[in-house]
Each structure stands twice: as structure tokens, then as C-alpha cells.
Amino acid sequence: MSDKAKGALGNEYVTLTDHSTGETYDFPLMTGTVGPKVIDVRPLYGQTGHFTYDPGFTSTGACESKITYIDGEEGILMHRGYSIEDLAANCNFLEVCHLLLKGELPNAAEKETFEKTITNHTMVHEQLHNFYRGFRRDAHPMAVLCGVAGALSAFYHDSTDINDPHQRMVATHRLIAKMPTIAAMAYKYSIGQPFVYPRNDMGYAENFLHMMFAVPAEEYKVSPTVADAMEKILILHADHEQNASTSTVRTAGSSGANPFACIAAGIASLWGPAHGGANEAVLIMLNEIGSKDKIGEVIKRVKDPKDNFKLMGFGHRVYKNHDPRARVLMKSAHDVLDELGIEDEPLLDIAMELERIALEDEYFIKRKLFPNVDFYSGIILKALGFPTSMFTVLFAVARTVGWISQWQEMIEDPSQKISRPRQLYTGHKDRKFVPIEKR
């Protein structure tokens, strides 16, 4: 098929020509506020008898959304029209949550009300403690998080009716508030320490760090620099358009599943190493390098076209320029390392040397292989004492608001229907059944 754009009755269309029959078909072009135009192919099968084929849906718009916009070529990430740089510099995480959920940044009174609402939902049902004891101590925290998030619908069944706007709102607040609590509980359970209850006198990021690292035996104070870095990590991971886990949440939600089940599905998708596990992969790579002395050998492998070695944390599938989130987090990474006074830490030394090379070496600059957000978040989390198994859990804590915002938007969109992709079938045609004694 070939195509050409034309105007018709004040609207734009794309004309598709089926060269096997000579038939032509017009399909409307849909225009967003920014970004490429979209061909509306909903009538395609009915008019032509053909489907489209797009593995990974890299050229397919599955929904209309007002939440997040990405321009990978220019290195732009916006939430509700605000650049990620402005949000990270001027907002805390819960302000960004309010923006994603409600479409606007809160004023002072709205901010106070929203923060109080989330804070009052941070505790979890006490019987969840028993639920954790059903897991092995060495279970991966993402496995625990996935199971517990899904189980929330068994504890909070008064907010699972997706047709009730009030119940949707309560479920939204509960998920954002309780995710740090159940994530910290997963960590504490894995190391045999007692659960630490949330504190109503702390901010969101500070409270999470306290639940992670405090113990009953002594007071634990969170450094403002560390809390600020955690706020930025949460903000920078809050939403990222129609990625794999977000699409999973929307797909699960399209069937009418309750929000807790949908978020559990998103967590399961995020767990994959090609998605949320990328910052964990950065630390694994640094461990494999082992020392600064081996960096030269690694760079040679990266530059060797015959070597399939991949430098984790550099470049991005979406961003063909700088990752705008990495620019923000780079300063926080250095601030945290300075604040904590970390010296002679082999992995962090390796990371800083790789950063220097990537920002100065013409090979990396020409190919735009700049450090991405996973590189810097991995460095920060390592410096703060998070085990690598908790890195993706942190991602899930941050991304919950994006998932639930996208889910809410889908529920309220009258054009949405149950997700049902089609396929290109390449299996057997009609076959005659053979009785078992003749096979």
C-alpha cells in the first residue's frame, strides 16, 4: 500500500491504495496539541479486510491522553504541559501527583489538603503483617510487592467499584499512600528487621526513607539532601507515557479489573530487566567491571562493532538526545555523594569515571550515548544503601501515580473498549483429525 495526505471538507485524510485490487480508501488524520499526527485506522478492517502489523506497537497510538508528552528526538518530557526540569526544580513529589491526577498544580490550600489526605492513608491493614509471613525471607522484593499490591483488593474491597467516582478516588489515594509502606515492609521482611510504621509528621520521601532504614533501637534522621534526592527520583519516574507497564495497566483496566489488580499487573510488567530493571542492571554491570583499571578494556569492547557488549545506563530507546531526567538527577547524584562523604567506593568510582568518559569521548557524543536516568538513579540508590533488589521497587513506588492517573483517564474515556489486539496467523491451515492409534 502507498499513502498520500490530502484535504477533504476542511479535514485531513490519508489515502491508502491497495495495489492488488486498485481500490483506494480514505482514513482521517487525528491531530494532537503537539507531536506527530495519527492515522485513524479503526475502520481499516471493515473497509479493506486488512489488519495492521506493528510488533511492540512502536507506531501505534492505542489511546488519547492529556497526561504526559515525550519528544525523544529533542529530549523533552512534559507532564500536563510542564517540563520535567521545572517540576523537579520547584515541586515536591505529591505536588506532581496532584498534577498528574487532577490536571493542575495545587494552590497552597489544595496542596495542604492533598498531602494530608495521602498522609492519612499511609498505614496498612494490620493483618497484612500476616500476609508477609507467607513469603520466604529470600523472596525478591518485587515478587512480594506484586503479591501484596494485588492483595490490597482483599483488604480494601470498599474501593474496588470502578464505576463509582468516589471509590476510584479513595483507591487512588490508598495506592499512592500505601505503596511506600508495603515496599519498605518488603525490604524489612527480607532482612529480618521489624516493620517501621509510617510517620504523619514527615514528608512522602522522608517518610519512605525512615520506614526503610530506621530501627526501634535508635533515632534515625533523614538528611535533607538525601530526602531531596529521593523526591527527585520519585518525580522523574512518576510517569513516562505509554510504556510497557503503563500499557499493561491500561490493558488490565480495559477489562474492568479493579485498580489494585491493575497496579499489580503494572508491577509485574515493570519487573522485566528491559523496563524497570535497567537501573539494577547498571549496578550489575559495575560489579562485573570490578575496578577502574578495567574501564579501558570495557570502552574498547563498546567501540568494537564485532562485540555485542552493551554499556548499561547509556543511551535510551525513546530519547535520541539527552535524557532530560538524567540532566536533573546528575546534580543530585553528585550532591548525595558529597553529602555522604563517600570515598574509595569502587563501584561509585567506576560510575563516575564512566560518566566522565561518556561526556567527553567523541565516540559517545557523536552517537548520543549519554548517561540516562537509570545510570544516575542507580548511583544514588547505591550510595543511600539500597540493595539492588530494591531498585525496581523504588521505580514502582514512583510510577504508581502515573499508572493510576492513566488508569483513571482510561476509565473516564468513552471511546475506550476492552483491549483486543489482532494477529498475523502463520500456523497450520485446516488439518484432518487423526485418531491416536494412527498417529
Image (tube, rainbow, N blue to C red):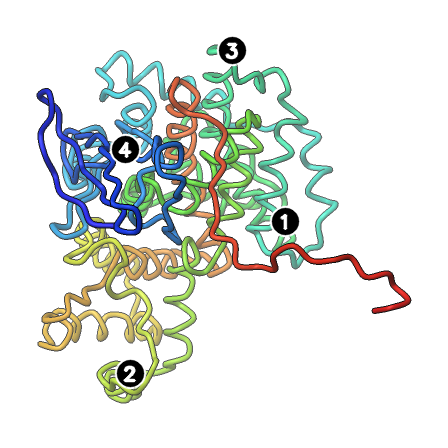
Q: State the image coordinates of residue 302 (x, y, percent, origin top left).
A: 26, 81
Residue at 41% from the left image edge and 47% from the top image edge: 244
Amino acid type of the residue that numbered disc 2 sits on in the rendered structure: Lys
Q: Which dot, 4 or 3, sits closer to the camera?
A: 4
Residue nearest the observer in this picture, 224 or 172: 172
Amino acid type of the residue that numbered disc 3 sits on in the rendered structure: Asp
Q: Secondary structure at mark 3?
A: loop
Residue at numbered disc 3:
164
For disc 4, the neighbor class at 10 Å (few under 14, some 14 to 19, many from 20) is some
Earlier-in-chain disc, 2 versus 3: 3
**Res 157 → quadrant:** top right
Residue nearest the observer in this picture, 124 or 360: 360
Residue at numbered disc 4:
40
Residue at 24% from the left image edge and 33% from the top image edge: 27
Q: CA distance from mark 4 to mark 2?
A: 52 Å
Residue at numbered disc 2:
292
Amino acid type of the residue that numbered disc 1 sits on in the rendered structure: Tyr
Residue nearest the observer in this picture, 339 or 382: 382
Q: Which dot, 4 or 2, sits closer to the camera?
A: 4
Whether tag 1 and tag 4 are in contact, CB under 8 A, the answer is no
Residue at 49% from the left image edge and 41% from the top image edge: 266
Residue at numbered disc 1:
189
**Res 358 → quadrant:** bottom left
Residue 168 appears left or right of 44 = right
Q: CA distance from mark 1 to mark 3?
A: 35 Å
For disc 1, the neighbor class at 10 Å (few under 14, some 14 to 19, many from 20) is many
Q: CA distance from mark 1 to mark 4?
A: 50 Å
Q: CA distance from mark 1 to mark 2?
A: 35 Å
Earlier-in-chain disc, 1 versus 3: 3
Q: Is residue 213 visible?
A: no
Earlier-in-chain disc, 1 versus 4: 4
Earlier-in-chain disc, 1 versus 2: 1
